[in-house]
Image (tube, rainbow, N blue to C red):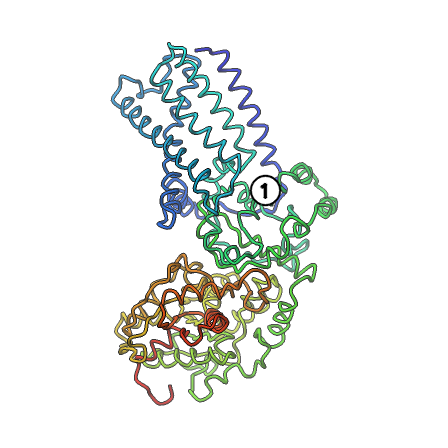
């Protein structure tokens, strides 16, 4: 052992590492503040579940590579103690931690565990090298860096085995010892320069996750304050947490697996966006560090204005306009990176400041602003769908338990009006006391917010909350998952706090309580049925079983598509994309229709849905692909209503 050499190695390596880490994190001081230290208990729980527990890596879809990573992670946790011990032995050969001496039972137990994880990590690194060099799955970024790091890991395990076997007294054992220490220090200093920076940042990133998820409840911009934020123009407009996100990206590519934009050839890969932002952040790091030192507000804003716009070469408009905000990327990410809010903030800057947006988006904004719906149909026609049903209005002052928030599609789209009427039939059959807002209802503004028009969204949200609170609404049932998400997760930002359920949830509940007793849906006897999970129902709000339970109540068994529930594939309409032309790649809805058709077989059948946008997109996709004769698209409520007796006024 050589204390002087050990000290020199440690001083040089730790000094350089500290210098690098400071340079990486200093720029974050110039970025937008973001409080992420609330609800400590929930954060610790997430850290244990997703960080140390590695939950998202053990999904059945990619179990083997996830297991290999878990083995490596466990090995590094166990071997951290061994690494400190080896450096201690560099100063004194007999060094060991108290109670962990080689003659103690605890020490022998630790050494046995150490040997197990060493061999496990060696085999896992070989397995990953095989994937990178031989099988080469699409989602992996092929790079020398990944191979080098796996070489580091394998080298650490081999030298540990060699030193353990030959001991410090032999030349080979001593060589293994010093090579091991050098690799540890090289590995440590290599981490901040590539994707493996996540080894340092991933656990803090999980702890500092958004509660609730930021993609389901986008941040509210204070549009009236002096120096208000209108989205993201340059790297300086990111929050420090968004910068930590890009540092934490492992480039594993799990975000791409079921991403509708990536799968259908759109210019959006969240992995690539993270990489582009990280490289730009590092490149602009010195300017951001200088920016953080500027005390004068005017001078600071002037300096911010000199930074290059992200939309001009870092993240192209075609990239951030492509996102359907389906949420798959955030559901799949092992380190809980928040991708969607960054893209929405880029849209906000384009819309609110640059007035640069697709022409179709501008029309949608005008229609919502003038008529309270994206179609631009006269707002006085909002309740025509039920003019013959004598549906009670909240304004009439009657006693009601649930407000049926019909939504724009349910009020104005001819196809979706049938779903609205089916829901009324179900509610009446179960003797649910409900009312609608009628002409007082207006668009929640979901499409406006996700297309970047935060100002219009806030107008719509405030109007909705004022109306609903004015009528004392406590419980809300929606037929649109986008309405559900907005009312449930985003209206609390404006003082609107309600119990909100999707109609499939209420149907399932009513059946379970015995208040709704439908018969079999005779019209579907002998027909295959599959269910398409809406993104804003299944992923954003965790509702997957209620629609299937509602279908089972009328004797319908679901033949599952390969991509279902959490991994369900988007219809292509979310994030305001319902209203935009799909000009790049192949059509998302056609991809999903092809899967539904393959699932149902040559005889075809029924695609059950629980979202107005999904119904429209899949119906159109069936027609576009020549499957409209084979595939019939029905809402869950329509199918349940088939099992109910026909009554007058329903």
Relative depth, front residue between 32 and 407: 407
Nearest the viewer among 51 and 68 is: 68
Q: Which residue is mark 1?
A: 278
Q: Residue at x 74, y 44 (%)?
A: 299
Measuring 44% from the left and 70% from the top, which residue is drawn there? 611
Q: Is residue 52 left or right of residue 413?
A: left
Which of the 4 quarters of the picture holds residue 69?
Answer: top left
Q: Position of residue 395 (x, y in %)?
A: 48, 81
Which residue sits at x=48%, y=24%?
Answer: 183
Q: Quadrant of the N terminus?
A: top left
Examine the rendered structure and indicate whether residue 501 appears above or below residue 200: below
> Is residue 1 shown above or below 634?
above
Is 435 displayed left or right of 244 in the figure? left
Identify the secondary structure beneath mark 1: helix
Where on the picture, by quarter, is residue 294? top right
Q: Residue at x 46, y 77 (%)?
A: 416
User: Can residue 38 be seen from the camera position used here?
Assistant: no
Where 198 sits versus 389, above or below?
above
Q: Quadrant of the C terminus?
A: bottom left
Image coords of residue 293 (percent x, y)? 68, 38
């Amino acid at each position: 052992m050589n204390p002087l050499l050990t000290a020199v190695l440690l001083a040089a390596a730790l000094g350089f590492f500290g210098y690098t880490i400071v340079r990486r994190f200093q720029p974050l001081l110039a970025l937008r503040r973001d409080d992420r230290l609330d609800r400590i208990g929930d954060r610790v729980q997430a850290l244990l579940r997703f960080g140390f527990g590695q939950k998202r890596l053990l999904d059945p879809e990619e179990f083997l590579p996830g297991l290999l990573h878990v083995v490596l992670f466990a090995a590094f946790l166990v071997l951290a103690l061994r690494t400190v011990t080896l450096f201690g032995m560099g100063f004194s050969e007999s060094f060991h931690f108290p109670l962990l001496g080689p003659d103690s039972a605890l020490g022998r137990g630790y050494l046995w565990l150490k040997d197990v994880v060493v061999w496990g990590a060696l085999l896992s690194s070989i397995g990953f090298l095989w994937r990178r060099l031989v099988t080469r799955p699409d989602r992996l970024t092929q790079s020398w860096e990944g191979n080098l790091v796996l070489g580091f890991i394998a080298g650490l395990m081999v030298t540990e085995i060699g030193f353990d076997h030959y001991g410090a007294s032999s030349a080979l054992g001593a060589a293994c010892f010093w090579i091991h220490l050098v690799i540890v220090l090289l590995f440590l200093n290599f981490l901040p320069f590539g994707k493996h920076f996540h080894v340092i940042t991933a656990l803090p990133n999980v702890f500092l996750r958004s509660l609730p998820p930021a993609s389901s409840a986008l941040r509210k911009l204070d549009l009236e304050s002096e120096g208000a934020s209108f989205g993201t123009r340059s790297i300086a407009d990111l929050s420090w947490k968004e910068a930590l996100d890009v540092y934490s990206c492992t480039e594993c590519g799990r975000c791409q697996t079921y991403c509708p934009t990536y799968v259908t050839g759109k210019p959006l890969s969240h992995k690539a966006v993270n990489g582009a932002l990280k490289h730009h952040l590092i490149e602009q790091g010195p300017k951001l560090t200088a920016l953080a030192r500027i005390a004068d507000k005017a001078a600071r804003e002037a300096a911010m204005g000199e930074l290059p716009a992200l939309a001009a070469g870092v993240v192209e408009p075609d990239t951030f306009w492509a996102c359907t905000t389906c949420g798959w990327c955030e559901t799949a990410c092992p380190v809980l990176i928040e991708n969607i809010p960054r893209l929405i903030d880029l849209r906000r800057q384009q819309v609110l400041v640059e007035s640069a947006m697709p022409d179709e988006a501008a029309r949608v904004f005008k229609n919502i602003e003038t008529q309270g719906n994206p179609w631009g149909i006269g707002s006085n026609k909002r309740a025509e769908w039920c003019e013959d049903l004598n549906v009670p209005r909240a304004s009439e002052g009657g006693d009601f338990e649930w407000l049926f928030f019909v939504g724009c599609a349910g009020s104005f789209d001819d196809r979706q009006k049938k779903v609205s009427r089916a829901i009324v039939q179900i509610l009446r059959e179960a003797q649910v006391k409900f009312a609608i807002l009628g002409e007082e209802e207006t668009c929640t503004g979901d499409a406006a917010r996700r297309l970047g028009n935060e100002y219009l969204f806030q107008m719509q949200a405030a109007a909705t909350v004022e109306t609903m609170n004015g009528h004392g609404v406590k419980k809300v049932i929606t037929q649109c998952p986008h309405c559900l998400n907005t009312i449930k997760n985003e209206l609390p930002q404006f003082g609107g706090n309600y119990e909100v359920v999707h109609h499939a949830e209420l149907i399932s509940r009513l059946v379970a309580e015995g208040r709704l007793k439908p018969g079999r849906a005779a019209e579907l006897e002998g027909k295959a049925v599959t269910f398409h999970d809406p993104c804003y129902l299944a992923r954003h709000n965790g509702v997957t079983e209620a629609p299937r339970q509602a279908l089972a109540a009328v004797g319908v068994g679901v033949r599952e598509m390969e991509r279902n529930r959490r991994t369900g594939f988007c219809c292509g309409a979310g994030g305001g994309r319902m209203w935009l032309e799909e000009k790049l790649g192949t059509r998302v809805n056609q991809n999903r229709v092809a899967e539904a058709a393959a699932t149902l077989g040559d005889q075809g059948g029924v695609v059950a849905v629980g979202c107005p946008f999904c119904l429209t997109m899949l119906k159109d996709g069936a027609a576009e692909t020549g499957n409209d004769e084979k595939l019939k698209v029905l809402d869950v409520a329509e199918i349940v209503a088939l099992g109910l007796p026909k009554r007058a006024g329903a």
